[in-house]
Image (cartoon, grey):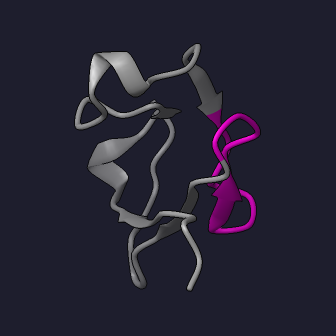
Amino acid sequence: MSDVKKLEVSAKDLPLHCPTAEVAQWASHPRVFLDIVKTGEVACPYCGTKYTLKVGEVVSHH
């Protein structure tokens, strides 16, 4: 069994960064912004958490 977290995000969660607000302060690493728009998925280079964009989400640029 893998310890890697897998999270599904929606367009309202963008810009995406890790760690998210749900991560305990003591367990966090430096904040890094992740580009999920191009491929629909991305992994955090610090903790390995895998993020995927929900199917059917439309991302509009501000």
**Residue lying at 27% horizontally and 27% vertically, measured from the top left:** 24
User: Would residue 45 be counted in the magenta stretch?
Assistant: yes
Counting from the top left corner in percent of width and height, residue 25 is at 30, 17
**Residue lying at 27% horizontally and 47% vertically, measured from the top left:** 12
Quarter holding residue 4: bottom right
Q: How many marks?
A: 0
From the viewer's side, name the closer residue of 31 and 24: 24
**Residue lying at 41% horizontally and 26% vertically, measured from the top left:** 27
Quarter holding residue 20: top left
**What secondary structure do most residues of the magenta stretch adopt?**
loop
From the viewer's side, name the closer residue of 13 and 18: 18
From the viewer's side, name the closer residue of 59 and 26: 26
Placement of 27 over or under 40, stated as above or below: above
Quarter holding residue 55: bottom left
Residue 35 left/right relative to 16: right
Query: Which quarter shows the N terminus?
Result: bottom right
Q: Which residues are magenta?
A: 34-47
**Residue lying at 38% horizontally and 71% vertically, measured from the top left:** 57
Residue 33 left/right relative to 24: right
Placement of 3 over or under 11, stated as above or below: below
Residue 39 left/right relative to 19: right
Counting from the top left corner in percent of width and height, residue 18 is at 50, 33
Counting from the top left corner in percent of width and height, residue 39 is at 74, 67
Query: Which quarter shows the C terminus?
Result: top left
